[in-house]
Image (spheres, rainbow, N blue to C red):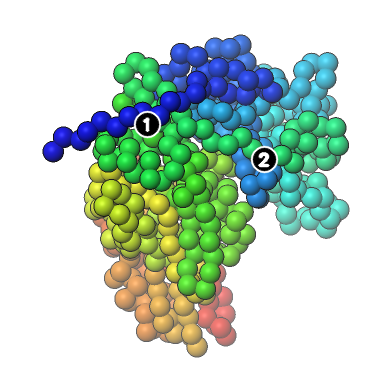
Amino acid sequence: MTRTSRPETAVAPAFLTVNGQGTPLGDVTPHTTTLDWLRDRGLTGAKEGCAEGECGACAVLLSRPGADATTTEWVAVNSCLVPVAALDGQEVVTAEGLGSPDRLHPVQRELADRGGTQCGYCTPGFVCAMAAEFYRPDRTTRAPRHELDDDHEHGPNGFDLHALSGNLCRCTGYRPIRDAAYALGDPTGTDPLAERRRRPPPDPRHTRVRADGAELVRPTDLTETVRLLADHPDAVLLAGSTDVGVDVSLRGSRPALLVAVDRVPELRHLQVDDGSIRIGAALSLTEVERGLAGRVPLLAQLFPLFASRLVRNTATLGGNLGTASPIGDAAPVLLALEASIVLAGPDGERVVPLADYFTGYRSSVRRPGELIREIHIPVPLAGTAAFHKVAKRRVDDISSVAVAYALDVTDGTVVRARIGLGGVGATPLRARRTESTLEGMPWTRRTAAEAAAVLATEGTPLSDHRASARYRSAMLEQSLLRLHAEHPAAGEEPS
């Protein structure tokens, strides 16, 4: 059956507002990164350090919806990953737009005064990431420092040091950078970027950019998105571009059609009720984190360990699950939460338990033309929750092993156990044999040890450059022993 072509809707020329100045995108390809586009226009503060979102040298500020649709929030993103065509109609601020040598921005002034820069290569990225936190609406002054000795990740001015977790510095050292962050005051009433927060962000635009035999399209709603995917089942979905952007920058991937879904309204909701939690697939992880505000403890443990704030500002749960990667950190957590996903396609919608979603290495039951619309998490949640990530770095690193636990312990007995695993097989998986070993047994050190021995054999651990199979098995076993040590049954002494 041959599909009939559809008439195309006229689309206005693409443009980007940079440092307050509207600028046509010009003859860009769908794969041109925001970083390359900015540098081609002389805005060379942003640098390419890694081209995969791990160093933050390319960070810029991007306007995004605030807590409600009537306000704007400035978020920092990696410009090396996002295609500039995907930002059509949006607002970007670079380090040059924050200040100048004779009129420094408060962030730039504090970094200069406190010796927070040396070679300067990474500094503009630090400046933008720090400025996003400077303008965070709910950043508030905290208690005097002597009352916060046990909190080394928040300053007395409310600055969250995790805002800089995606920025690397090779020569200055992080102490003066931290000192500069913690010395920042509040934006003044005349600060134009602070004032900009009071108005709505730009509306998403219907975008169509063609060049070099490729195309980027931004549909306006889910119906148009599904129709596009039905007509072009090989199209590549683009949300945060934290995965696709790496393929384009480092692996030379050039998809013929990119469909940007990050602003599709039907994919951007967060609903909490008595029966479930529903998370739109295109909400950024930062938006999900702040929207849930700790109501799902297992996700709250995941977020600080999921890459960096720069990545979480654009990455989505839909994208993380859509890749079907065996090392995606969200999958083990959502498996332990017994999540389901809603797939939307030309034949309507269907609900698939996440445990049945993965079919092989980077493959799933998702059919050509389908996309993930939302994630369902059933409530009530388990009483004991923990996420253990084993990686060479605490944050912003790919896990060698990831384990998520959701246990209900009643009167000292495990009545329900759900365990999600990542990095130990071709797919994320449920540790069902371990779950069966735990359920109905007293939650004691002996039970934990017996179940830990079973957990060490779950999956098909392999040896690669991150870890050996033997190491992965050992980490699985130790993870369950650690869980019991940190969450003993009532009346049982911690081990």
Kindly tell me whether residue 1 is visible in this rendering: yes
- Find residue 15 and report its horizontal and vertical position in percent: 55, 22
Q: Quadrant of the N terminus?
A: top left
The disc at residue 258 is: 1
Between disc 1 and disc 2, the foreground one is: 2
The disc at residue 481 is: none
Q: In the current view of this chain or complex, which residue is farthest to the bottom? A: 411
Q: Which one is nearer the viewer's eye here, 395 or 312?
A: 312
**Amino acid found under the numbered disc labelled 1:** Leu
- Return the disc, 1 or 2, that comes first in the chain's sequence: 2
Kindly tell me whether residue 472 is visible in this rendering: no
Judged left or right of residue 263, residue 123 is right
- Find residue 93 and report its horizontal and vertical position in percent: 66, 26
Residue visible at 50% across and 88% down in the picture: 411
Residue denoted by label 2? 200
**Amino acid found under the numbered disc labelled 2:** Pro
Judged left or right of residue 447, residue 39 is right
Q: Quadrant of residue 9?
A: top left
Q: Which one is nearer the viewer's eye here, 316 or 360?
A: 316
- Find residue 67 and report its horizontal and vertical position in percent: 66, 50
Residue visible at 79% across and 56% down in the picture: 148
